[in-house]
Image (cartoon, helix red, strand yellow):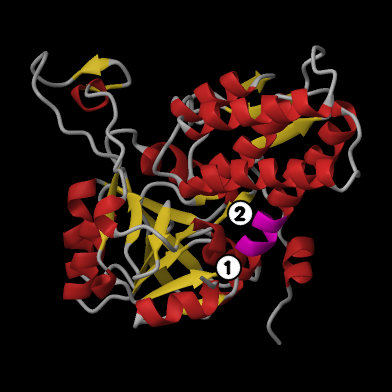
Amino acid sequence: MKPSIEDIRHLYKPKVKPIEWNHNGHLILLDQSKLPFETTYVTLTTPEATADAIRTMKVRGAPAIGITAAYGMVLALFNGSLSTLNDALEALRKAKVVLDAARPTAVNLAWATNRMVKKAMDLSNNGDAKTPAQLRELLIKEAEAIFDEEYNAEIAMGLYGLEKINEGDTILTQCNAGGLATGTGLGTATAPIKIAHALGIEVSMIAPETRPWLQGARLTVYELMVEGIQTTLITDTAVGLVMYKGMVNSVMVGADRILRDGHVFNKIGTMKEAIIAHEFGIPFYALAPSSTFDMKSKVDEVIIEERDPDEVRKIRGVPITVEGVPVYNPVFDPTPPKYVTGIITEKGIIYPPFARNIPRMIGE
């Protein structure tokens, strides 16, 4: 019998907690920019500090950014100068502008801030919140609901993804789409693997390093080894060889944005993995909650974020090339739908043709 979400919640206990909320108005984040060498936590008390933590990748990964942004919105209401509901609503609108600008490609960020503003308007209009303090407490519950929905969605994705895993499989991923990226400890692309491991199914992972921030080497390897899952680290340039040699049974990656036609925007290097996997007949799956789908944008309308050139010129502050060399440093790439075997969501697995099947499962 297939385990239920409650079965997995009881069985699987995350060993890493990237996001914690302190009801005194503090948001506590595990600083992922310091991992795996330092386990350091940062305490945030304002939307501006939260936006900076998102921008500087102390927290990263689409779902984790969404959860963090939701709590960042709440922090706007821990301001003693707010005397009316209108003051509180205006503070939320300003916080949304600040937070949305932190990582424009991650659709979960704007999704979360939009949800918090809408919830605040509803609570104000229907009289459930009559003071800024009441609104704040109810929005804390909304942020908590976003966290719980994400965790349950990841378990559901993990159970669907488990259907694509056999005993002894090795799965290749990209970047970090684990519990650090989602804020829950479970993850999207790692959810099937962690659940399989918890159920006693032998499974292992291959993690490319993911230059220039090395999220694979620093984060994916870290959290999988903490969980006791067999993991092999490779260079980004070894992806083709390990597939050619038959060392990979499937590819499972996360996503920062998925369009209604099936284009998957994920960490740079994902498109390369998908194309190579397609060439060698290896299944390629993207795992993401329904909040990651962008049902309006065309592929050429999506802004691909470019980051500081020194991230490429240096590794952890140490120069590795000629000073001042021009750099192109895009963070994401779009994987065309022809290379995607399936998209695994909390609602089920979506197969091609995506332009027809994504709206059917996700909605318009």
Which residue, given by chain and number where applicable, does mark 2 sit on? 186
Q: Give the residue displayed 46% in from the left and 40% down from the top.
A: 219
- Depth check, front residue: 355 or 71: 355
In the shown orientation, is residue 299 left or right of residue 11?
left
Q: Give the residue displayed 43% in from the left and 81% down from the top.
A: 357
Amino acid type at mark 2: Leu
Residues at badges 1 and 2 in contact (C-beta under 8 Å)? yes
Residue 40 in view, yes or no: no
> Pointer 1: residues within 10 angstroms few (<14), some, or many (20+)?
many
Residue 113: where, in percent of width, then height?
61, 41
Q: CA distance from mark 1 to mark 2?
A: 9 Å
For residue 196, above or below residue 317: below
User: Is residue 150 on the magenta stretch?
Assistant: yes
Quarter of the image for the N terminus: give it: bottom right
Q: Give the residue displayed 63% in from the left and 31% down from the top.
A: 93
Q: Secondary structure at mark 1?
A: helix
- Depth check, front residue: 165 or 349: 349
The overriding secondary structure of the stretch rendered in magenta is: helix
Q: Earlier in the sequence, mark 1 or mark 2?
A: 1
Q: Secondary structure at mark 2?
A: strand
In the shown orientation, is residue 41 left or right of residue 297?
right
Which residue, given by chain and number where applicable, does mark 1 sit on? 158
Total number of numbered discs in the rendering = 2
For residue 39, above or below residue 177: above
Residue 252: where, in percent of width, then height?
40, 64
Residue 114: where, in percent of width, then height?
60, 45
Q: Which residues are magenta?
A: 149-154
Residue 289: where, in percent of width, then height?
55, 61
